[in-house]
Image (cartoon, rainbow, N blue to C red):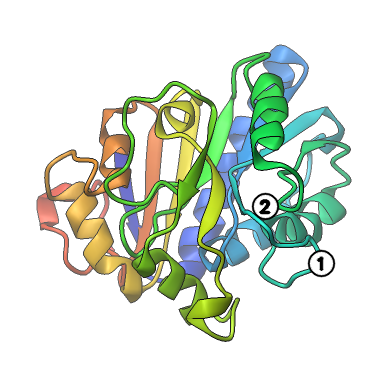
Amino acid sequence: MIIKCFKDKMELASVAAQEAATILRDTIQAKGSARLVAATGAAQFEFLEILTSLPSIDWSRVEMFHLDEYIGLPASHPASFSRFLQERLINKTGITNHHLLDGEKDPAEVVRRTGEALLSAPIDVAFVGIGENGHLAFNDPPADFETQEPYIIVTLDEACRRQQMGEGWFATLADVPQRAISMSIRQVLKAQNIVCIVPDSRKANAVKACFDGEISPLAPASILRTHPNTTVYLDANSAALLRPGTLASAC
């Protein structure tokens, strides 16, 4: 794992998008197609805006999978991750081969069907973030580091739900769903490349716990340190609490 730091979230997003685009182009050239896992949330805004504007990515050859979704939330809701991906990735690139998680259908069936499709071939690159509680996808602490199931049904902890409210997706804590479908930790780690986008000071405590502390289910994203092709992109605010020696590049 490599940790890179940038002066602000726009510089972070620009470099991360360029490097993600290179992975996609190189994979398509080598294999004829690329399989992508896409994350959502406020941390991904600038990254996806830049990535979808870059030239020479043949999005018709990209197969996209969805990282996580709330259970019981319609795709029309502003907080729906399916809606997020439609608006910020699918509509902008014309991706037609995508597997969105439907929060209104039977969760067990969604998990089974999407999991089968996911396991049909390797994943080339996963875009992920880190939650304020250190979660990876919707795997809140203590995360399950053992299950080999591609998708699991999880109960969201209060810190996670408060983050969603704090980002403006929901008016009150009571409005935030308590359950979600999430890609499992082990499945995320199966991606050949992982691009982890983590800007903003509100993520600083989680960044320190995950990258200066022990690798532990109590800091779920700490498991990224075991992955050989993960790059974590921080800005000066999210990296503020890290020991200087942790960073591959100074902010």
Q: What residue is pinned by disc 2?
A: 51
Q: Is residue 228 above or below residue 138?
A: above
State left or right for residue 164 relative to residue 236.
right
Rendering quarter of residue 61: top right
Name the kind of residue labelled 2 in the image: Leu
Q: Label 1, label 2: how many angstroms apart (C-alpha)?
A: 24 Å
Badge 1 density bin: few <14, some 14–19, many ≥20, Cα 10 Å = few
Q: Looking at the image, which residue sits at the far bottom?
A: 171
Nearest to N terminus: mark 1 or mark 2: 2
Picture mark count: 2
**Residue at (32%, 45%) from the top-left corner?**
221
Residue 249 percent location from the top left of the image: 27, 52
49 or 40, nearer to the observer: 40
> In this view of the protein, which residue sits in the foreground, 224 or 138?
138
Q: Is residue 250 visible?
A: no
Height in image: 206 above or below 61?
below
Observer able to see residue 190: yes
State whether residue 31 is above or below residue 28.
above
